[in-house]
């Protein structure tokens, strides 16, 4: 039996809330499920507004937060039940690139320090020469040179720092890189350079990506598959061109319509945003989009609609009671 590279099953995560203060918990993930395929390597985007639970999902995959319920599975193995050996292997196979590359560097050390640490931790080189070769190769893949290793973090540009982080992630030869908004802090030309690097790593190094973004345009550019996240739930998913070309969920349509298409300068940098992004997220027992849905009909049943294929056997899935009646 072959498993997806990464599988998230019914992930639920709440933050805060206490009986004493009467505060209600914030539901960051509410039954979120998705998979990332590794053969062939693929780029899977998670797109959603700020507060939709994207970073919580990334943290759960990286083992920084524990889910209330649900599972993260890597090649069929549940992260929660991995023994030390499997977990060590998992930490090597799954690397991360974050929005703010500066935060990952220790300002007192030269950039090369991070590379040395990674090689030593994972015992990846048998000799000094092999270590040097591996580092040079990783830097080459992102268009940097070994001279940059001697610099302190503040001597690198934002784009160089982010490319260093990508190089460090590939040095370890992972199967998956979790990239949480990796290009939202860099300017347009660097953005496309980093997106190109991701495509090349997919094609030439067989590294898959969980690409988290609040920007549909970059997802459209590079992602093979996309999952649209709304309040901790995937409301639509499938091949990116299909989901964004023929969106079936009213929320996906709202997001696409909110992109100012005629203005190319904004188009590539338009965050997903509607008026309700910062609303308090309470655990829901009904369609999470019901109160906002421009198409909700009196006839929509109560309860949470599950993701289901738009037609038999389709990989394009939508969680909407009216998926087969609307339009
Ligand atoms: N450590 C935390 N403590 C309390 N609430 C949190 C914490 N992290 C995230 N949240 C809340 O969980 C929800 C999802 O947040 P997050 O996963 O960061 O979303 P995104 O990355 O899509 O912006 C938000 O309502 C956010 O305020
Ligand atoms: Mg985030």
Image: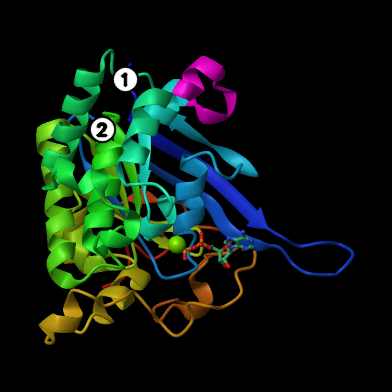
Tell me which corner region of the image, top left, top right, bottom left or bottom right, holds residue 182: bottom left
Q: Residue 252 versus residue 214: which sits nearer the camera?
A: 214
- Whichever of callouts 2 and 1 sits on the residue coming sooner in the sequence is 1
Q: What numbered label is drawn on residue 93?
A: none
The reply to whether residue 313 is in sight is: no
Q: Is residue 78 left or right of residue 132?
A: right
Q: What numbered label is drawn on residue 171?
A: 2
Q: Residue 147 versus residue 293: which sits nearer the camera?
A: 147
- Of the 4 image quadrants, the one containing the C terminus is bottom left
Q: Residue furthest right?
A: 20
Q: Where in the image, quadrant-wise, is ligand 1 located?
A: bottom right
- Tell me if residue 63 comes above or below residue 53 in the rendering: above
How crowded pointer 2 is (Cα within 10 Å; few <14, some 14-19, many 20+) is rated as: many
Q: Which residue lies under the disc numbered 1? A: 124
Residue 248 point in image, percent of width and height: 28, 65
Magenta stretch in the rendered image:
78-88
């Amino acid at each position: 039996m072959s498993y997806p590279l990464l599988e998230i099953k019914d992930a639920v995560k709440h933050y805060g809330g206490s009986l004493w203060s009467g505060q209600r918990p914030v539901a960051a993930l509410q039954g979120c499920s998705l998979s990332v395929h590794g053969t062939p390597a693929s780029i899977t985007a998670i797109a959603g507004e700020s507060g939709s639970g994207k970073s919580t999902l990334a943290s759960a995959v990286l083992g920084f937060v524990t889910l209330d319920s649900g599972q993260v599975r890597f090649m069929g193995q549940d992260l929660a039940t991995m023994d030390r050996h499997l977990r060590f292997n998992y930490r090597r196979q799954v690397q991360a690139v974050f929005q703010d590359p500066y935060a990952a560097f220790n300002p007192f050390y030269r950039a090369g320090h991070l590379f040395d640490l990674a090689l030593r931790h994972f015992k990846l080189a048998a000799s000094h020469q092999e270590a040097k070769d591996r580092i040079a190769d990783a830097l080459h893949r992102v268009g940097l040179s070994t001279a940059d290793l001697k610099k302190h973090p503040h001597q690198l540009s934002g784009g160089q720092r982010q490319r260093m982080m990508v190089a460090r992630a590939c040095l370890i030869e992972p199967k998956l890189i979790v990239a949480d908004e990796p290009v939202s802090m860099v300017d347009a030309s660097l953005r496309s350079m980093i997106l190109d690097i991701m495509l090349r790593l997919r094609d030439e190094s067989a590294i898959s990506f969980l690409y988290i973004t609040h920007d549909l345009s970059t997802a459209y550019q590079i992602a093979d598959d996309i999952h649209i996240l709304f309040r901790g739930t995937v409301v639509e998913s499938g091949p990116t061109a299909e989901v964004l070309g023929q969106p079936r969920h009213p929320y996906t349509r709202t997001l696409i319509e909110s992109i100012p298409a005629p203005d190319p300068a904004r188009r590539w940098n338009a965050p997903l945003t509607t008026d309700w992004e910062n609303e308090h997220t309470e655990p829901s027992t009904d369609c999470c989009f019901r109160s906002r849905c421009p198409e909700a009909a009196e006839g929509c049943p109560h309860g949470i609609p599950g993701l289901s294929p738009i037609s038999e056997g389709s990989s394009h899935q939508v969680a909407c009671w009216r998926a087969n009646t609307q339009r």
